[in-house]
Image: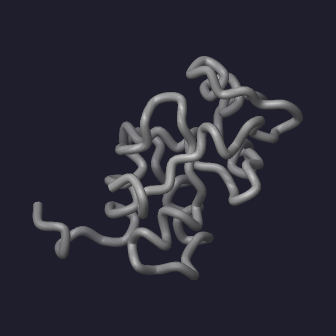
Amino acid sequence: MKPETLNFFDKVYEVAKLIPYGRVTSYGAIAKYLGAARSARMVGYAMNGSSGKDVPAHRVVNRKGLLTGKHHFDGTNLMQQLLESEGVKVIENQIQDLEKVYWDPSKEL
């Protein structure tokens, strides 16, 4: 499928699938990479609708490293558990050492 035929959510999913194991990015970084810098909230909506699409939505957090999307995961701490299973340290819904695990698609792709 050609990129221009993908809708915005599909483009978000394609970027999210590229986030490396053990790394995180932000809603805003994905939006900026896609040329829609003011659409961080739409990226969040896309992540919320990504269930069943093999998208590592747990690797997308807010710009401060907070697990703001955690209530969209089954169970109370699934998002945190998935991140911790990849070696990402999380304390009180906050990614620790964010600068070490942060992946910026605008710089990496």
Instruction: Give the residue at x 39% y 53%.
Output: 108
Query: Image quarter for residue 84?
Result: top right
Instruction: Give the residue at x 60% y 56%.
Output: 26
Figure check: 10 above or below 93: below
Q: Position of residue 6 (x, y in %)?
A: 24, 68
Q: Position of residue 40 (x, y in %)?
A: 59, 70
Furthest toward the right, the residue is 92
40 displayed left or right of 67: left
Figure check: 11 above or below 104: below
Figure check: 39 above or below 69: below
Q: Nearer the viewer, residue 52 or 109?
A: 109
Query: Image quarter for residue 94?
Result: top right
71 displayed left or right of 30: right
Locate the N terminus and report the quarter of the image it occupies.
Answer: bottom left
Locate the C terminus and report the quarter of the image it occupies.
Answer: bottom left
Instruction: Give the residue at x 55% y 77%.
Output: 39
